[in-house]
Amino acid sequence: MAVDTKKVDEIIAGYEKSEESLLAILQDFQREFNYVPEEGMEKLSELFGVPASKIYAMGTFYKALSLEPTGRHTCKVCTGTACHLKGASNVVDVIGRQLKIRPGETTKDMRFTLQTVNCVGACALAPVVVVDDKDYYEGASPQNILKNLKNYK
Amino acid sequence: MESRKLNSVDEFNEYRAKILNSHKGDYPVIYVCGGTPCLAKGSRAVAEAFRKEIEAQGLECRVELSLKITGCQGFCSKGPVVSFGDDIVYMEVKPKHVPEIIEKTVKRGEIIEALGYKDPATGKKAATFDGIPFYSHQKQLILGDLRKLDPFEIDDYIARGGYASLDRAFSMDPDAIIDTIEASGLRGRGGGGFPAGRKWRSCRNIETETRYVLCNGDEGDPGAFMDRSIMEGNPHAVIEGMIIGARAVGAHKGYAYIRDEYPLAVEAMKKAVVDATALGILGKNILGSGFDFEVKITRGGGAFVCGESSALMRSVEGKVGEPRAKYIRSVEKGLYEQPTVLNNVETWANVPLIINNGVQWYRQTGTDGSPGTKVFSLAGKVENTGLVEVPMGITIRELVEDIGGGVLGGKRFKAVQTGGPSGGCIPQSKMDLPIDFDSLTDAGSMMGSGGIIVMDEETCMVDVAKYFISFLVEESCGKCAPCRDGLPRMLRILTDITEGKGKEGDIEVLEELCDVLSYGALCGLGTSAPNPVLSTIRYFRDEYEAHIRDKRCPGHVCKSFITYRIDADACTGCTLCAKQCPQKCISGEKKQTHVIDQDKCIKCNVCREVCKFDAVRVE
């Protein structure tokens, strides 16, 4: 997939040229492109003088980063302890069946990526589902979430 | 207030006087909670409704003063929470309630009981902090300010006495600061409970040019949200603590490492650093003291292991966050191999309190071994989910029953889980155990960062152990063999047990694996990983045996052992379950008893959730 290299440069330019900035830049890539593109990692390696293998290692180590393109929307089902007790695994199951994907996968039309997350710290809403890191849904009824998901194009 | 660099403590005090002056006139203040759960439940719309109503009525109060969107007000399960002054608090407020609140409470100071908290036991309503057990049993040294502050306004913090401790700290000798913290008995709130003063002293005593102070905001324990709420609600308190710590140990650079899953906390902390720097409270020559200190915000990458000190430091450096062997202490060789003090968010927030109020005052609260308060996030199968702050030494019973309002839906209490994946489960028989660092460790759990998860009779303890081990399998960084290979082996056995394939001897093998892990793993994550398994075996061995021998799950959780059935006597034939069933495997005519097709049923529990007549049984 071709990536807007101008955007890549822009993101890198916003940071101090030090190893300390690597993780933040990779996260910005993730946010901008919905994944960490190879072009971006190569550029970083070149500009920062850090071996590409090291940057790749970060890309695979940190859960917030994905090397595969992800969907336009991310649907994160919280599987923290409180959510687990209140049936989060059923929520994952029902949403996964409906979208025909498993956690970590993306729908064919690139609309949704389904993820599980280890606690978003909103236990009062348990089981909670977060869409696009900003919309929080109480997940007690998975059907209700499926209805809401229709609003994300 | 217009921000300019303040060059001395005098200028700071003048600035503060100016803010207080501008607050003159008793404008009624409406505090709308802006914590994550309240926002999700619509508090922004409530705030907007207040703003409109105030404007429409042309009320004699200035909008910026009369309405504040604050940090977490604690009572998350009853959000959106709205409070007034020091006394009145309303729950589950909706925009439609706004005109009545303006009319009665804001204009006439009347309390609207109907919007208060309904005691599930007595049915009585209360709308004051003193009248609601959830609040009245707490002692809020840290959280009290959260419900009064706009976290994005540094002036708010300064007006309430924020950054006042710097004057004192700068006039003290660094060693005297450390003496004070040591005498206060402050112990690290992040989990281990290591004495903060001792950590600081070790760091200061090392001869070097460069030292660092770090704030651990990588709150990875599932079910814990204290640090999120403090960073979101009172970021400046954390920064003030860090400045004092930096001055004490002689550090000029600090980092706050914050979970990326907490976007609001990142935003609040970033803004706090920018604002404090603009006023000269951070940066070069802080308030003319000659002391330099800057803070950088680092976002975490979603790896649980990065909450471990050495892994966190590697991550700050921009590397893969793998821990290293424990015998190298980070106070000697931490970030960039320099002496480093790492404390968690809540620990830092305690520091200004101690400097301001003194050791004696601080030690009045809590126990001898664990002075002060502790913030807990109370969650799980409990009536009142939320953020609570209590004196150390309070019993589990007080926390769950008095503050938490008991188990959700009147079910029977089974256990509390404390300390996250490194902690353990404490059974009903130990409900009168005081909560402090040492008692919890003795009981086979740990304080951890402060997540308290309540479990009821419908919780399966083997499933809980499996849950934590599968969490840890995923989060193990893979560097050392006991953790990398031991945990998946344990998970396999636990999975077999929950699927009816358990056999005699499994429990003993689990215990043996736990032993190996606690001796052989490289970091704290690995050595504490056995706790969830060991503590559930210790207190709930009978449940393991029921799975293995009787092929039965006492909590009715493990899917291999249960079936869903609709009770013909209770079913009214309302068709709701049939409509909601994702498998479309419930059949029945209107007003006739419905039936579940067992071959197609995936046991997703949706029918049971939606049934209004409690007709779906799990057996």
Image: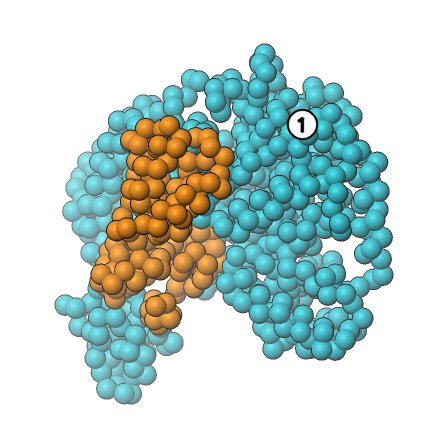
Chain colours: A orange, B cyan
Q: Chain of mark 1?
A: B
Q: Secondary structure at mark 1?
A: loop
**Vertical arrangement, residue B118 with respect to residue B322, above or below:** below
Q: How many marks?
A: 1
Percent x, y of residue B137: 64, 52
Q: Residue furthest front?
A: A6
Percent x, y of residue B197: 62, 24
Q: Residue at x 44, y 44 (%)?
A: A11
Q: Residues within 10 Å of mark 1 (few under 14, many from 20)?
A: many
Residue nearest the viewer, comparing B137 with B231: B231
Tell me: B312 left or right of A96: right
Tell me: B327 left or right of B138: left
Q: From the image, tell me which residue sits under label 1.
A: B292
Q: Residue furthest left?
A: B599
Place residue A87 in its image quadrant: bottom left
Q: Residue at x 18, y 39 (%)?
A: B504
- Location of the C terminus of chain B (image quadrant): bottom left
Q: Is residue B422 visible?
A: no
Place residue B390 in its image quadrant: top right
**Vertical arrangement, residue B559 with respect to residue B355, above or below:** below
**Vertical arrangement, residue B388 with respect to residue A132, above or below:** above
Q: Residue at x 66, y 39 (%)?
A: B277
Q: Residue furthest top?
A: B207
**Vertical arrangement, residue A148 with respect to residue B73, above or below:** below
Residue nearest the viewer, comparing B51 with B229: B51
Residue nearest the viewer, comparing B470 with B435: B470
Percent x, y of residue B457: 38, 56
- Inspect the image, locate mark 1, and give the three-letter code of the amino acid beneath it: Asp
Tell me: B296 left or right of A90: right
Q: Is residue B587 visible?
A: yes
Q: Residue at x 20, y 67 (%)?
A: B601
Percent x, y of residue B612: 38, 76
